Each structure stands twice: as structure tokens, then as C-alpha cells.
Amino acid sequence: MKEIKAYVHSNRIADVISALKASSVWSAGGNGDHNLTVYMVKGSLLPLDDSEKRYSVELGEEVVNEYKLELHCSDEYADELVEVISRVARTGQVTAGWIYVIDIAQAIRVG
């Protein structure tokens, strides 16, 4: 099992989620026991424009409101889901975000 973590600009997150749900993995039921979670985070991506810049009093510096997406999936589906995120999250910047793929040693269902 894999965990995919992606950090993307706020103006791309809705399209990323829609593209994931429209992917062949999702539509074929390949998402299995997935868990898709999205958080707004204060990050360090380069802002696309001045409207993305924020000043964090807590951190004492300028930040960008970005989104962190977490998705759990079977190993066989990770590459396709990463490709979807990478393609749809693009902004035209050299670095528009980050995607991490992590092996999950064990997943235990509660309930």
C-alpha cells in the first residue's frame, strides 16, 4: 500500500481532485480502501501572484496558502494517480508543488 502526499497551489486543488475522481483508477473501482484527505497549509511554494502571499504572525514570515492532499492506494495504482496529480497541478512555474510517495508498512481498519 502507498501513501501519496502532494502539495499544490490553492487554485489547482479542485481540478486535481476532479481529475483523480475521473481517472481510470477511480472509475474502475481501483481506489479500493483509499482515504483522500485535503488540508490547507501554510507553505513555502513560490506565489503565483501577490494574491497568494500571506504574512503569518505565528511564523513571522511570508507564506503561501497551499493545499496538502493525502491519498492511500494499492501499490499498483500509485503511478497513475501520481501522473494525474502531476499533470493537473501544473501552474507553469518550474516548481509548482511536490509529490511524495511513501510505502505503508501496515494499514489496520478500525471498526
Image (cartoon, rainbow, N blue to C red):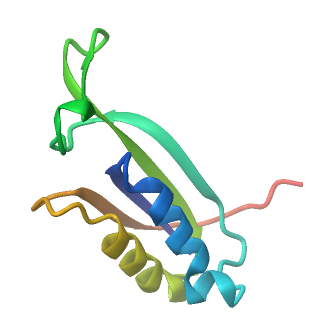
Instruction: Give the quarter of the image for residue 64.
Output: top left
Q: Position of residue 28 (x, y in %)?
A: 69, 90
Give residue 51's quadrant in the image: top left
* Foreground residue among 107 and 93: 93
Picture quarter with the C terminus: bottom right
Residue 76 higher or lower than 95, as above or below: below
In the figure, 25 relative to 13: above or below? below
- Point out residue 77 in the picture as x, y percentages from the top left corner: 52, 85
Q: Going by the image, does 80 lie left or right of 89?
A: right
The single residue placed furthest to the right in the displayed view is 111
Task: Say if residue 12 shows up in the picture.
Answer: yes
Q: How far from the left and from the top, in percent, is residue 5?
A: 42, 58
In the image, taking residue 7 as reference, residue 13 lies left or right, namely right
Where 103 falls versus 38 (above or below)?
A: below
Q: Which one is in front, 49 or 41? A: 49
Tell me the residue at 46%/63% (across/down).
Answer: 15
Name the side, left or right, on which 55 lies relative to 4.
left
